[in-house]
Amino acid sequence: MDNLEALIKEHLNKEAQSKTRRHFIKSCSSGLGGLALGSMLMGCESFSKTGSSSNRSFSERDLNPLATIPPPFSPKVKSVIYLHMAGAPSQLEMFDYKPKLLKLHGQDCPQSLLEGRKFAFIKGTPKLMGPQAEFVQEGESGNWVSNFLPHFKNVVDEVAFLKAVHTDQFNHGPAQLFMHTGSARLGRPSIGAWATYGLGSENQNLPGFVVLTSGGKTPDAGKSVWGSGFLPSVYQGVQCRSKGDPVLYIEDPEGISRNLKKSTIDAINKINKEEYAKYGDPEILARINQYEMAYRMQIAVPEVMNINDEPENIRRMYGVEPGKESFANNCLLARKLVEEGVRFVQLFDWGWDSHGVVKSGSIDMGLRNKCTQIDRPITALILDLKQRGLLDETLIVWGGEFGRTPMQENRGNKKMQFKGRDHHGDAFTMWMCGGGIKKGASHGQTDDIGFSGVEGRVSVHDVHATILHLLGFDHEQFTFEFQGRPFRLTDVEGSVIHEILA
Amino acid sequence: MKKQLYYGIAAIVVLTLVGLLWNKIKPTDRVDFATQVKPILNKKCISCHGGVKKNAGFSVLFEEEALGNTEAGRPAIIPGNASASEMIKRLKEKDPELRMPYEQEPLSNAEIELLSEWIDQGAQWGAHWAYSLPTQVDVPAPPALAGFSLETEDFIQNNIDNFVLARMEDTQMTPNPHAEKHTIARRVALDLTGLPPDSTLFQEFVADKITYESFVDKLLSRSSYGEKWASWWLDMARYSDTKGYEKDGGRNVYPYRDWVIKALNQDMPYDQFTTEQLAGDLLEEPSMDQLIATAFHRNTMNNDEGGTEDEEFRVAAVIDRVNTTFEVWQSTTMGCVQCHSHPYDPFRYEEFYKLMAFYNNTRDEDIPSEAPTLKFYSENQKKQVEKVVEWVAKRGDNATAKAYNKFLSYNEPVYNAHTLTDFKNGSYDDHASSILWDDGSCRLANVTTGDATALFLKYSSGVNGTVMTIRKNNAEGEVLAQMQINKTKGSIIRKIPFAKTEGVYDLYIETNNDQVAKEVNTVNIYWIGLLPDLPGKGTNGYARIENSVVDLLNATTPTVPIMIENPPHMQRTNQLFERGNWLMKTDTIAPATPEVLNPWNPDWPKNRLGLSKWLVSKENPLTARTLVNRVWHQIFGRGLVSTVEDIGSQSDPPSHPALLDWLALRFMNEHQWSIKALVKEIVMSGTYMQESIASPEAYEIDPENEFYARGPRLRLSAEQIRDQALAVSGLLSSKMYGPGVMPPQPDGVWQTVYSGAQWKESKGEDRYRRAIYTYLKRTSPYPSFLTFDAGSREVCTIRRTTTNTPLQALVTLNDPVYLEASLELARRMNISESPTENISVGYGLATYSEITPEKLEALTHLYNTSLVEFDNGAENSPFYHLQKRPEKELAALAVVANAIMNLDEFLTKS
């Protein structure tokens, strides 16, 4: 394997020597290996100013598209853990305390709120439904948390709430896409793909962008919520699974020992080096590199995905259930992954769509149960990252794709068997925690019944702008050239939410 | 005399030098808008003064905006007077608050000079090269004899090479020699059929029994040609076996995929290929195939998620059709024109909606049944349809006969349940049907029933004894139809008499059933259709024909979604959407094509058929260029315009502009839109036949092979990688067509919400079909294809970005599909007692070339290592997908075969 390194070094040196600045810019915009890195010009320019050593780091990227590149501005965090509650959790039972709504419980929803509005299932005139949880003010910040989250209240001073997030989508699929790609239509890269594209990965033996799902289902919008859109597919999220191979095809076939796999890769790479000598195509060097990485990944991925090696107290802290697909397991895995330098970890937990059609989807019982499933693991995740000194360099984002109505759902204009709330995009709660975040902050307010934001309204684009800001990007400058125009995660909108930044 | 000549020469030299210098300072020729001015405007001005932003009321996108009054009340550009033009003043301004571009680097003096000169010359506007096509292009003469080596002489095989060589000369590069026979044989077979050549054909060619041309011809005539090129087209057509969005349920649209394969194999001319897909339904007496072809635009997604608005997603599908049409045929992104004029290209905001008007009147309405769908009747049923149509034609009129034929073929036109309104004791039940309870009513507003005297109702009911009455306009109106509704088994279609009614009016529908409790569904209505009754009532045989009609309508058959136009009385109004919002409709508009492109021929109908004729008009500057550019891209991995998705003012300039235009003209005129002829011409060129070897210096000068001084060397596509592995191992099935198949994929990959759909592993040869037949679920595509850069086909994909990742290595090393192929290849290799001979044979079978001693040594070493391992290991242990390891020699060969199938040379066409 020394041989390979020598070979790559030689190739890079040759390149560095022969490249003038003009050449360099050109190779940035066209790239090797089919990487259309047109919009990396921003990155390129910052490199070219700092001289030839950075030249090298870009060429490294040609051979390894996940090679690390520093962001243009000083970053507050290195990694992101994004916790998505798929189905949309009710803000009114978790964080957005509305005592007035309790008083109005059972009354008809005022017509003024219904006029010109569309709901997914609500028909006619629904009734208002008071909060189905009890709330207390917690910590020094005095932020409200419900009794559905008895552990989380202990870390409430670590997080910053966004109480008046809004989205213009009220169906799961499009809203999830919007939340993760900045567009309700398909074809755009997800935040994780943007981050990995812009920064590469700190650990070359693991994927740069890992996705973990729980709750028995994948997101409504499918794999596009962690897709790479028009970015090269190497930046798409890699789904790590709790059952079967943690990454598809990571395990050696039956009857093939590690040693034999190593011999196989040695033979392949030896021949590929011959091929490089004959054809001179740098793509072959990249392939040699990828096979080496694949071999290392085969060891690294099962290692990092194994939670059994964690000490008992840690496992208890998270409440993990080894061998099962659970949100708690995924939280512990998320910590392990960012500890190992994975750039973006995305968790999807299914089961938050509390319409009240079935018991598990009811606001008073089903939702409470879901809250119990995440309460301990999320609290543990925050504390665990903190005790390891990782919380300062990690950003945790929590939220759903929209919120839920202050009105009780009346599907088909009938009273329903269980208490439920319909989809609602006008105002919902998200929170962030970690590096660069103002601890204990709460930004934005909704009206008395939690229907609309009346102060500090922020959009999905604003949330994205803030995440990119913390990673060291100006969301207006971070673009990718596609179909003749520069595209960005925030399209033509978004502003950084400074109110929750430290 | 001699002296004079010297003076003359000296004068010319001096003048030339002066001219050159002069040129540097002040261009003497007319400044060309398209090549000199427009690039500066696009780069430096248009982001603030263009289609999106028009700061200070000034935009340089369209001529009248650039020369018209700005907010200051006067123009910023005064033709003929640069120094009086505000634009030039602002470019030269010293105060950074006033200088343009604002807060950006100033323009260079040369750029300002050029713009000034252009204004002084009259500020002539011009079209970008992409929007006009020359009528003739001359082939460059072969380069002068000096420096013309034997190699370059050999290089020129057809006219393409003259264009390529002329450009190569500019860069002082020289072409590579021809690739060796075995190399070119594998390369061209992979390019034409997606598979390595079969051994007979390969042997004939390398043994000089057949020429390269007849080798190519034979490959072009293989049915595998259509299977290969179909994946390229299906990426653009966003073909998939599911509907997409949240529920992502199955969709039976494979007959369209098969249509594409057949059309490509028959080499259907591209103009016809275009028309049938965009407007097959609007042709005279369309055939089944022509109707199937229209599924091109039914590949849009269909949203069955609970609580979604059908109209919203119908509009989304229509918008997608406009965008896809322009991406596929015009290399133009219309997406941004939905909200504002194109930021760079000369397309106006209104023009998007004028184009959309062509597509806005099809019957599909985002309902779960995906209607309209074409029914595939059995032979027997087809005869019944014929009998019905014959009956009607004989006793009634032709129009009615046609109407029955259509109604039986695809159940249109009908009013879908979601168009019902004004519910009393009832509601539209999300996504499927409208429900009425006892004493329920609803309204179907603004209908025209004309000659209709028969009402067809698709409904279901769980109770007996409901009376449904349909009245004119309201509860007091005349009774137009009445029927008793009883319990049904699932949904059924019934025919009842209907009172002929003139004019535009409302159908008022009411239900009564005293026997049932409140809030019990008495009926679920799916759709209502209205037709003239069958003629010949009371005559002998009428009852049989009427029964046939009802039976046929109720017959469950395979179907495919198709495009069908609204009849005149069901036409939707076409309106602009304010800032792209479908809920904010403004001015009414009529269908039209963008002004900057070719003119509209008044003989064309103003519908999709006319639109398709406009696209394949020889005057259209983009259709042929787009196609030849993309075919070239498929073969060379790079387009002549490298941005294959975009040919316009922001695209990269063509590397070989004359060649692009020459190929485009030739494709239309000489080749008569034959894709096979175009493909053949390209692979017969010396440019294509070159060796792909290159020195580091050559990579340095031309990393992307823009000048084609070497042959293409590219990683194979996801489909090719699978198909090749199956082919060389002898596993590949040659079965064509039919529903998508499910080769092995890991458990638990499909976990879609609200869907019972399961990946049911195919049996027998269906496990080994070509990749094109693999079932494609949009929210969860076949994992190994995804890893090798195939897309999820949710939207039109013009170009897949090729990546190189460790996950790809894991697929070809560990995926059971590739392990099975390795073992089978090992069996094919296992011909003698000599391991080295076996390894050489295996390498040859896979790569079509002879193994070198170094490679043989590396693989033999691997073989021996494996043998030692297997010697030491337990005998009865599992191996690959097998319960028990085969004899150690075969197992060791399988390990070697697996290594061979992971070699760069195997995964790449060289």
Image (tube, coloured by chain):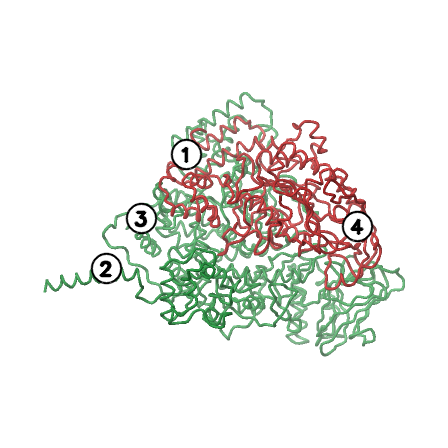
Whole-percent x, y for residue B893 in the image = 49, 30
* Among numbered discs 4 and 1, the one appearing first in the sequence: 1
Who is closer to the viewer here, B302 or A188?
A188
Name which residue type carries label 1. Lys
Do marks 2 and 3 share a subunit? yes
Q: Which residue appears at 77% of the width and 45% of the height?
A: A367
Check the residue under mark 2 and report the chain it is in: B
Do marks 3 and 4 share a subunit? no
Q: Which mark is residue A356?
A: 4
Which residue is the extreme one toward the bottom? B502
Whole-percent x, y for residue A459 in the image = 64, 53
Which of label 2 and label 4 is nearer to you? 2
Check the residue under mark 4 and report the chain it is in: A
Per the image, label 1 sits on a secondary structure element best described as helix
Residue at mark 2 to residue at mark 4: CA–CA distance: 86 Å
Colour green maps to chain? B
Residue A447 falls in image quadrant: bottom right
Image colour assigned to chain A: red
Per the image, label 2 sits on a secondary structure element best described as helix
Which of label 1 and label 3 is nearer to you? 1
Name which residue type carries label 2. Leu
Who is closer to the viewer here, B276 or A469?
A469
Disc 2 + disc 3, Cβ < 8 Å: no
- Seen in the picture, residue A50 relative to B129 is either above or below; the reply is above
Name which residue type carries label 4. Gly
Check the residue under mark 1 and report the chain it is in: A
Residue at mark 3 to residue at mark 4: CA–CA distance: 72 Å
Per the image, label 3 sits on a secondary structure element best described as loop
Q: Which residue is mark 2?
A: B17
